[in-house]
């Protein structure tokens, strides 16, 4: 049984298999995986955690959730020891969300349960990337040649870091647009825009990202209202957008105007609905790979 620490732990063939199984599950097919999934969450989460719980149950697994802030991590137990402890108590799958970047991977060698990364610091969030790919494929059939624009806080976005790689592997072109302070350097192969209106003319689909104020060490935008004016999805801009996604949670009236979050061109609700199917498929396939 393998781990899913980042999107490159999966081959394109495995991603295709996962997309197919997730679609079948959404159409009503059932899978039965034996074992237990333990969720260890050390950062806030609503949709990812509940989606993993729902996905694990749908796959037939027993589910336990540990709130990291009430665990021995608070007493100084290392992440590695926590993983070993969860495994000794019967975890076949350990789903974790942690505030630090999992690097080097040496940290987890020797852990036999399948590890699934539900977000490690600003590095990766592979299952969100899989959910978003699934959502785009469901709507469009293919992402080959699709121009996908990421808007906003690219610097701190683990969703961007996973999703960009996955989309490019399936033939999409990726662009970014945001304040210069929030666009990391060295994004090779990515179209760079500082003007949102120009970027929207380029894009076939737009992923709005949350302004992650909790990760910013200093003020990286002058004010929320100026950020919204320059990079937010306003009613005016909505007319020029074909399709948009947001991994959630949305900062209403900062990333996206409140009334537009679930507007007809939004895939936000569909992203959330698809989460459990993609995660159930992942549990089932990780067990067989
Ligand atoms: C994202 C995350 O936690 O990385 N949310 C999610 O899992 N759906 C994005 C975010 O927090 O902005």
Image (cartoon, helix red, strand yellow):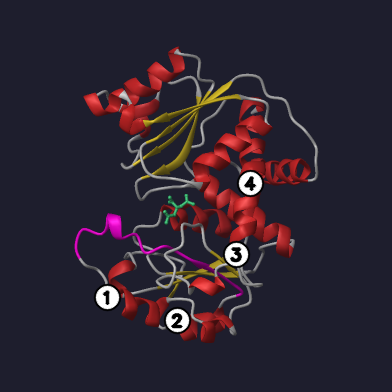
Q: Quadrant of residue 97?
A: top left
Magenta residues span: 204-218
Q: Residues within 10 Å of mark 1 (few under 14, many from 20)?
A: few
- The verdict on label 3 being within 8 Å of ligand 1 is no
The foreground one among 224 and 124 is 224
Looking at the rendered structure, the secondary structure element under dot 4 is helix
Q: Vertically, is 74 above or below 278?
A: above
Q: Position of residue 16 (x, y in %)?
A: 69, 46
Q: State the count of labels.
A: 4
User: Seen from this angle, which residue lies furthest front?
Assistant: 259
Q: Nearer the viewer, mark 1 or mark 2?
A: 1
Looking at the rendered structure, the secondary structure element under dot 1 is loop
Q: Residues within 10 Å of mark 2 (few under 14, many from 20)?
A: many
- The verdict on label 2 being within 8 Å of ligand 1 is no
Q: Measure the C-alpha gap from mark 4 to mark 3.
A: 14 Å
Indicate which disc residue 223 carries.
Answer: 1
Q: Position of residue 113 (x, y in %)?
A: 50, 22
- For marks 4 and 2 on the same chain, the one whose residue lies earlier in the sequence: 4
**Badge 3 is on which residue?**
172
In the displayed structure image, the side of residue 17 where residue 220 appears, left or right: left
Q: Measure the C-alpha gap from mark 4 to mark 2.
A: 32 Å
Pointers 4 and 2 in contact (CB under 8 A)? no
- Do we see residue 282 in this rendering? no
User: Seen from this angle, which residue lies furthest top?
Assistant: 88
User: Which residue is pictured at 67% across the width and 30% down the height?
Assistant: 59
In the displayed structure image, the side of residue 80 where residue 59 appears, left or right: right
**Badge 4 is on which residue?**
12
- Do we see residue 168 in this rendering? yes
Q: Position of residue 12 (x, y in %)?
A: 63, 46
Q: Vertically, is 258 above or below 131?
A: below
């Amino acid at each position: 049984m393998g781990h899913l620490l980042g999107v490159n732990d999966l081959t394109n063939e495995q991603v295709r298999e996962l997309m197919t199984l997730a679609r079948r599950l959404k159409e009503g097919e059932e899978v039965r995986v034996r074992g237990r999934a333990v969720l260890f969450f050390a950062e806030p989460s609503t949709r990812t955690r509940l989606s993993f719980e729902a996905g694990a149950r749908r796959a037939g697994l027993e589910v336990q959730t540990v709130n990291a802030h009430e665990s021995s991590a608070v007493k100084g137990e290392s992440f590695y020891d926590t993983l070993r402890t969860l495994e000794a108590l019967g975890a076949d799958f350990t789903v974790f969300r942690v505030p630090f970047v999992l690097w080097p991977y040496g940290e987890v060698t020797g852990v036999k349960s399948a590890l699934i990364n539900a977000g490690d610091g600003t590095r990766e969030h592979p299952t969100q990337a899989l959910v978003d790919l699934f959502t785009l494929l469901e709507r469009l059939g293919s992402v080959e040649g699709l121009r996908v624009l990421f808007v906003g806080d690219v610097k701190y976005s683990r969703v961007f870091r996973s999703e960009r790689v996955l989309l490019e592997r399936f033939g999409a072109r990726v662009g970014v647009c945001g304040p210069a302070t929030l666009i990391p350097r060295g994004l090779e192969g990515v179209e760079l825009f500082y003007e949102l209106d120009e970027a929207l003319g380029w894009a076939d689909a737009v992923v709005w990202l949350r302004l992650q104020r909790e990760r910013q060490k200093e003020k990286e935008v002058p004010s929320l209202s100026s950020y919204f004016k320059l990079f937010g999805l306003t009613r005016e801009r909505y007319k020029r957008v074909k399709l948009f996604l947001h991994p959630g949670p949305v900062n209403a009236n900062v990333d996206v105007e409140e009334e537009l979050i679930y507007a007809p061109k939004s895939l936000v609700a569909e992203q959330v609905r698809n989460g459990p199917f993609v995660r159930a498929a992942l549990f089932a396939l990780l067990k067989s790979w």
